[in-house]
Amino acid sequence: MARNSLFLLAMLLTLLIGLCSADWNILNLRKKAVSGISLKNYCESWRINVEVNNIRGFEVVPQECIEYIGKYMTSSQYKADCQRAVEECQLYLSSFCSLKGDGKDAWIFDVDDTLISTVPYFKKHGFGGHKLNVTSLEEWMEKSKAPALDHTLTLFHEIKEKGFNIFLISTRRESLRDATVDNLIKEGYHGWSSLVLRGLEDENKKVQNYKAEARKRLVKDGYRIWGIIGDQWSSFDGTPTAKRTFKLPNSLYYIS
């Protein structure tokens, strides 16, 4: 009996040792798999998680990913990703938007990196690798040299021709109104109903609250918001929202 008990105990110890060894082997395999991720894989994963709003509130692009993000934001892939978002928007417009024709059908656009691009500025300032210098950025904005994003320029005019009232809601300060209007007109945008910019009373508000309040005013005035297109999640957060929202890629900065 004692011999049988000792035999069973030995078998149990062997099994436990085997399981522990197997576990360590699994851990080693996992460690090897993680360490085998390339820098390109890591930076693409970081970018994707920014786009799906898993990574929030970042102040700078990770140093090791600056070159990758810079290449993406100036690449044909970035243009293709934007174009695909616009195509989905066009499909929605043609298939699901039945305007009442009473002048109360509205569409909202963000401005920076939705209608016009700040990429030329960030190209000269580290592609998001440095903490944003608002004074420097606003000095650049004052020059009214931001180029149009061709995909949204076309979409803007398609939406306008369908009879929507277009509202531009931007995080730019009121002091930049003249420069912003000049820039937009110069790049081919015209015919919007209103350009909403941040006044002094908005300075301490979170961007998502400021934009949600702008939408509340539109709804209070009887407008139906059919869609919003922007490059930041803060353009969509809060209530009221639109029937559909369309996010353009931007991993250079995060505005909340």
Image (spheres, rainbow, N blue to C red):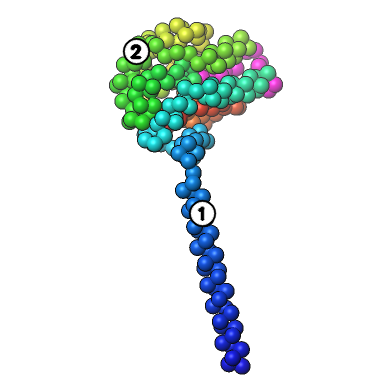
When asked about the image quadrant of residue 144, the answer is top left
Q: What stretch is highlighted in magenta?
A: 95-109
Specify few, some or many for label 1: CA neighbours under 10 Å numbering under 14, 14-19, or 20 or more. Answer: few
68 inside magenta stretch: no
Mark 2 or mark 1: which is in front? Answer: 1
Q: Mark 1 points at which residue?
A: 30
- Figure quadrant of the C terminus: top left
Q: Nearer the viewer, residue 99 or 150?
A: 150
Residue linked to disc 2: 142
- Left or right, 40 with respect to 3, comes to left
Residue 181: percent from left, percent from top: 42, 10
**Residue at (51% x, 54% y) in the render:** 30
x and y, in percent, of residue 110 in the image: 48, 21
Amino acid beneath label 1: Arg
41 left or right of 244? left
Mark 2 burial class by Cα count in 10 Å: few <14, some 14-19, many 20+:
some
Residue 173 falls in image quadrant: top left
Which residue lies at the image location 52% right of the left edge and 67% below the top edge?
Answer: 21
Circle 2 SS class: helix
